[in-house]
Amino acid sequence: MYRLFAAALAAASCAAIAQAQTPPPAEAGAVLTLEDALAQAGATSPSTEVATAGVRAAEAARTVAGLRPNPTLEVQSENIAGTGDFRGLSSAETTVGVALPLELGGKRSARVAVADARTDRARIEAAIALADLRLRVTQAFTEAAAAERRLAIAEDQARIAAQNLKNATDRVDVGAASPIDQQRATVAQVNAAAALESARRTVELSRVNLARLTGRPFPGGLDLTWFERLPATGPQPAISADRTLALAAASADLATANAQVRLARAQRVPDLTVSAGARRLSASNDTAAVVGVSIPIPLFNNGQAAVGQARAEQNQAEARRRLARLEAEREIAQAETDLANAAATARATTGPGLSAALEAARIARIGYGQGKFDQLQLLEAERTLAETRAAATQALQTYHDATARLERLTVPAPQLSGDNR
């Protein structure tokens, strides 16, 4: 039953890795989605290898904890190499026997309980590693998508700046505007070109960072439709910290501390060593049975200090569990607030705010070209449009980052052996 449960839990905790062991090669021009990036990262990340190796080590330690003490083969020869009748081996008494330690006080079951608790903790660590990896990949994907969106905006702004410079030059040539308009448009065009180069470098860096997590570069673009998607409005259900990984880890530490107290109490009970053998007397060539029992005397170390240490560690684990709950509740509340604020800002800047800025800039360009508006009005409209676009992109990035952090905080803990004991 235990092996069946261990196999099922290992399969569940490593599902993201298993489904991506042989990911299909990326095609040139193919769009990389977030799920594709997560699958590729799960197949190549060293953090998942560390976590799964930790689970295997804990399971091996559980097997070791369940083993019984080995017997001891004893060979003893007396009355040899002496003087007189005991010269040589003629009067030797040789005893051959086996000594078997007998553990008392439930030491073996207590060791197994400690190993089970540590195995559960290792499985939680594996789940934490997978959740942390998902968070890092999602954040890297969000940064790369935001960088590509900023690049598209910078390209559009550079095109607009070049067109505004052409319009200003034409107006100056026909004497409809002052040469200072041309200089202002030139400055705006130079700044737009510099911003475009910066955006290109940022895109390259973000793609490299994402490729480091996924394990390989991707020649195509990113799924920007996911980046621009916002949730439906309405009240969100309350999120509890009861099944979070942070609380599960603290609970596993407490379970380990409880098992350590039980083991420390069990170790106070002295063990017996039973021995049995046969003795051969060389002088008479007779054989006799030899039996014995030994038990240690707890004179200097009766195990009370170890029990006190285990109880202190148990109290510490209990306090840490209470602290973990408070921290989880605080972080979840903060992430929920950040998510709601970012979603509201994103809806405003990507909806009516962006539409108004686009329309104002369009009217200003037409009016400037017809001589109805001066250049300062045009530049102000363009500046407002650029700021609104930048705010919209930042709001979307903040929203997806807050979503990823909230998902990381609320990842449900895996089903453990201790849950059903």
Image (spheres, rainbow, N blue to C red):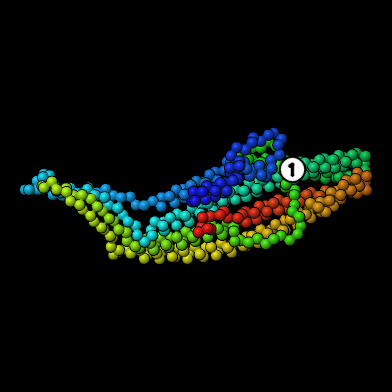
Q: Nearer the viewer, residue 241 or 6?
A: 6
Q: What amino acid is labelled 1 in the image?
A: Leu
Which image quarter: residue 205? top right
- Whether residue 199 appears in this view of the structure is no
Q: What residue is rendered at 85% in x and 52% in y?
A: 356
Residue 235 placement, left or right of 259: right
Residue at the far left: name it.
84
Q: Nearer the viewer, residue 401 or 150?
A: 401
Which secondary structure lies at badge 1? helix
Residue 150 placement, left or right of 265: right
Residue 206 placed where, x, y %? 66, 43
Residue 397 placed where, x, y %? 70, 50
- Whether residue 58 appears in this view of the structure is yes
Q: Residues within 10 Å of mark 1 (few under 14, many from 20)?
A: many
Is 36 rendered above or below residue 71? above
Which image quarter: residue 346? bottom right
Residue 231 placed where, x, y %? 74, 53
Residue 295 placement, left or right of 85: right
Residue 224 placement, left or right of 382: left
Q: Nearer the viewer, residue 110 or 161?
A: 110
Q: What residue is rendered at 48% in x and 47% in y?
A: 56
Q: In this figure, what is the number of numbered marks? A: 1
Is 264 rendered above or below residue 401? below
Residue 176 placed where, x, y %? 93, 43
Q: What residue is rendered at 73% in x and 51% in y?
A: 396
Residue on which the image places disc 1: 151
Q: What residue is rendered at 72% in x and 47% in y?
A: 227
